Amino acid sequence: MKAFDRYVAGAYWLAYDLCSLLIGEQIAYYRDCINTELIKEEGSDLINQMLDNDSSLQYVVCMAKGQYAGRVLTRKFL
């Protein structure tokens, strides 16, 4: 079982509430904006701002079956 992460839980809660306020086209727009930032990886201003503002986050390489599978923001365990 994964440890509870308030950062992730807050993001899910915020997204859930926002979806009830937005129409489908708006949701699609913001989904596309987030996907664009994820594609940028290290070049993403959004990801870099999150890393700069929360020292407990790190951006790590993910591997699947020995192959590069992208990067993910994760919480540092001290």
Image: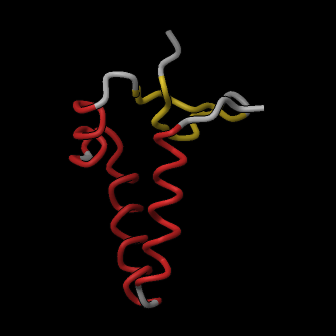
User: Please, is residue 46 above or below residue 78 in the view?
Assistant: below
Q: Residue at x 53, y 15 (%)?
A: 77
Q: Position of residue 32 (x, y in %)?
A: 39, 71
**Rendered image quadrant of residue 30:** bottom left
Quarter that holds the N terminus? top right
Q: Position of residue 41 (x, y in %)?
A: 35, 43
Q: Residue at x 43, y 80 (%)?
A: 28
Q: Residue at x 31, y 29 (%)?
A: 54
User: Please, is residue 31 above or below residue 75 in the view?
Assistant: below
Nearer the observer, 70 or 12: 12
Q: Residue at x 45, y 36 (%)?
A: 73
Q: Is residue 7 left or right of residue 55?
A: right
Point out the residue furthest to the top here. 78
Nearer the observer, 62 or 58: 58
Q: Position of residue 57 (x, y in %)?
A: 40, 28
Q: How is the image coloured?
A: secondary structure
Nearer the observer, 26 or 72: 26
